[in-house]
Image (cartoon, helix red, strand yellow):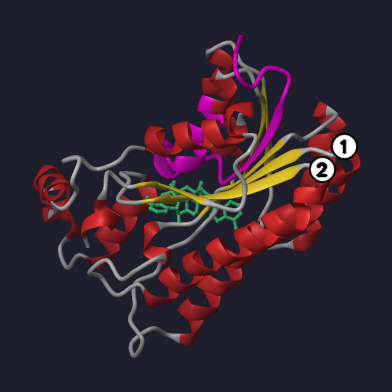
């Protein structure tokens, strides 16, 4: 029996740039493979639709929604649309996040505000509007995507990103304590270096000559920093999300799963 048969999962940021594979997209696909019906939400409807097409081609069920998770009215509407189309929500996967380079002195106020605005609201707003439904049902699972960058400096100045990702850990622990009496669990996943469109995009942005980037050489350099010897894939993150959403994790709440090949043990 599929582990998530009969469940409905709302996954935010379930699309990915340029038809690539991101953490949210892979998670939506893996949750569906385990029997969940997926509500794939993304800023761009075609990106969410593409994820749904992959799920349907694999025999799963999915609907696509477009919303900006930083706009409360859009989030409220998306939750209402998901409930009216699918009848229930059992799993909320808050995956949206943005990344901007910058240290304590050179980060701009605009970048700082954008990071706080998107990365914090991306967990706060969907959770706020799905929770009343979870409370009514006396059950539900929230999984927030943080990062090992939320724990420590990893060698590149991403101070605003790292601070917001650290905040997600704190938010998740507080949330877990508050909602546990309602039968609701909340945990965070802390990915390490994962090969996604967003990770490639920031490499391009930071490069003086993007056309000259040797992706294979970069991959080897990154892999050399990782105890398990390889860069992570979105499927590594997705598999942790499946576990946390499943009943196998029914006694796990208010904690973090690091998915980083051991990086955070060594830096
Ligand atoms: P991604 O490839 O950019 O996928 C995220 C998706 O979310 C994109 O389709 C994006 O649309 C969408 N999105 C962005 N802002 C949104 C908004 N306001 N409302 C709705 N959808 C929005 O990203 P990813 O690399 O898979 O990262 C996903 C999560 O993992 C992020 O929280 C990130 O911080 C975290 N993470 C990633 C890594 C890594 O190495 N990749 C490591 C640690 C943590 P657009 O493409 O149009 O922006």
Is 249 magenta? The answer is: no
Residue 7 badge: none
Q: Is residue 118 above or below residue 128?
A: below
Mark 2 crowdedness (10 Å alpha carbons): few <14, some 14-19, many ≥20? many
Total count of labels: 2
- At x 33%, y 55%, the residue is 201
Query: Label 2's element?
Result: helix
Query: Residue lying furthest right in this view?
Result: 136
- At x 80%, y 27%, the residue is 86
- Magenta segment: 1-30
Residue 193 screen position, x and y as percent: 30, 50
Q: Is residue 218 above or below residue 141?
A: below
Q: Is residue 159 above or below residue 26?
A: below
Question: Residue 39: which quarter of the image?
Answer: top right
- At x 48%, y 64%, the residue is 165
* Mark 2 to mark 1 CA distance (whole Å): 5 Å
Residue 166 screen position, x and y as percent: 48, 67
Mark 1 crowdedness (10 Å alpha carbons): few <14, some 14-19, many ≥20? some
Query: Label 1's element?
Result: helix
Query: Residue lying furthest front in this view?
Result: 251
Between residues 160 and 203, which one lies in front from this camera angle?
160
Is 26 magenta? The answer is: yes
Asked if labels 1 and 2 touch by Cβ distance under 8 angstroms, the answer is yes
Looking at the rendered image, the quarter that the C terminus falls into is: bottom left
Please give the residue where the numbered disc 1 appears in the rendered image.
137
Residue 253 screen position, x and y as percent: 62, 47
Q: Is residue 141 visible?
A: yes
Please give the residue where the numbered disc 2 appears in the rendered image.
134
Between residues 158 and 143, which one lies in front from this camera angle?
143
């Amino acid at each position: 029996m599929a582990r998530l048969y009969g469940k409905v999962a709302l996954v935010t940021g379930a699309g990915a740039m340029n038809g690539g594979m991101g953490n949210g997209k892979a998670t939506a696909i893996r949750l569906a493979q385990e029997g969940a019906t997926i509500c794939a939400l993304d800023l761009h409807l075609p990106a969410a639709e593409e994820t749904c097409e992959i799920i349907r081609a694999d025999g799963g069920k999915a609907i696509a929604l477009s919303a900006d998770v930083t706009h409360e009215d859009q989030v409220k509407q998306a939750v209402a649309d998901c409930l009216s189309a699918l009848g229930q929500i059992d799993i909320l996967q808050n995956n949206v996040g943005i990344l901007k380079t910058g240290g304590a002195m050179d980060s701009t106020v605009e970048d700082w505000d954008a990071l706080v605005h998107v990365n914090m609201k991306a967990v706060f707003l969907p959770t706020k509007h799905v929770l009343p439904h979870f409370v009514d049902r006396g059950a539900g699972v929230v999984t927030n995507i943080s990062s090992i960058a939320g724990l420590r400096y990893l060698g590149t100045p991403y101070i605003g990103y790292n601070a917001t990702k650290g905040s997600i850990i704190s938010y998740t622990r507080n949330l877990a304590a508050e909602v546990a009496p309602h039968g609701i669990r909340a945990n965070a996943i802390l990915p390490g270096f994962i090969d996604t469109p967003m990770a490639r995009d920031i490499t391009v942005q930071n490069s003086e000559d993007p056309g000259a980037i040797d992706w294979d050489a970069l991959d080897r350099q990154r892999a050399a920093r990782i105890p398990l010897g390889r860069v992570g894939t979105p499927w590594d993150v997705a598999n942790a999300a499946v576990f946390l959403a499943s009943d196998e994790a029914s006694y796990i709440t208010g904690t973090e799963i690091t998915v980083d090949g051991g990086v955070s043990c060594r830096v």
